[in-house]
Amino acid sequence: MLRVVLTAIFSCIAAVGMSKLIDLLYSRETEELSFPGEIRSRAVYRLPLLFAGCAAAFFQFDTAYPLAGIFNLCFYLSLLFISITDWEQYIIFDSAVLLLSAAGIGQSLTAEYMPEYLSLPPGTPVLPPGPMEALLSGLAAGGIMLLLAVAMKGSIFGGDIKLITALGIWLGAGYTSSAVAFGFLLGGLTAAVLLIATKKKKDEFFAYGPYFAIAAAIVRATGITL
């Protein structure tokens, strides 16, 4: 019961703080927003989504493995933040991706010396890649996404490329490829449903960032691969 109460308290604080940070970034980057005149209307579900995401992240924190838990929180909360801004305004802030990448590098540098990672603690079934593997995976993932962006002519944008690069650092090549595939599948199915429901037009932009983030979170939490 105490764990549930503490999770709810920390989740409320984190959700409100993240929402205020999003508003601050929007105010500073207004010219980069896709819907600058619809900030309030498009944020109507923001706090409930942030609370739910934060609650899921905090609830899985295992005090027996504090370092792994901290890295897990960095991963999941960063993806949550990125998903919200991309969903609302089709924008992935460089600062958010930079923080995610830096935390991923920190994880790769720490994993070699922390025995708690070798025991695969709950919530971290994906063994963190070493520093060299993380670097090469990030570069490879970003490069492949760049080629896909060119081939798909406007369906993939710079923010998506940077996000996948960060995921490569966190997950390594194999798990990142699974996350990207699942993300495309989930996003494609959602886009198809929206088209059928006439809520989207074929020439309208579609934010893939949230679907890559959801897929990456599932892959890290479960270790599922293609």
Image (cartoon, helix red, strand yellow):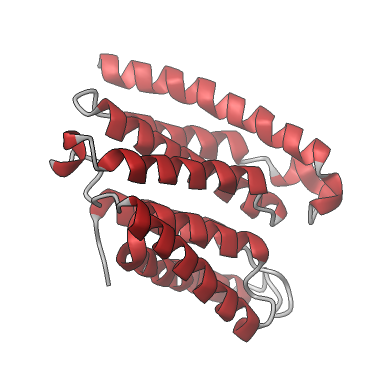
Q: Quick check: 62 above or below 106? A: above
Dividing the picture into quarters, in which one does residue 137 lie?
bottom left
Left or right: 34 with respect to 93?
Answer: right
Question: Does residue 37 appear in this view?
Answer: no
Q: Is residue 110 above or below residue 38?
A: above
- The residue drawn where x is 69% and y is 54% is 91
User: Which residue is found at the position 73% from the left and 34% from the top?
Assistant: 23
Q: Seen from this angle, which residue lies furthest top?
A: 2
**69 and 22: which is toward the camera:** 69
Name which residue lies at 60% across and 70% down: 194
The quarter of the rendered structure image containing the C terminus is bottom left
Q: Quadrant of the N terminus?
A: top left
Q: How far across and how far down the image is residue 11, in percent?
A: 46, 25
Q: Is 56 or 115 nearer to us in this picture?
A: 115
Q: Residue furthest bottom?
A: 151
Q: Position of residue 53 (x, y in %)?
A: 45, 39
Where residue 131 sits: x, y (%)? 35, 51
**Horizontal and vertical percent position of residue 112:** 24, 43
Q: Is residue 71 above or below residue 218?
A: above
The quadrant holding residue 110 is top left
Could one spot residue 222 in this view of the protein? yes
* Outermost residue to the left: 119
Q: Residue at x 68, y 28 (%)?
A: 20
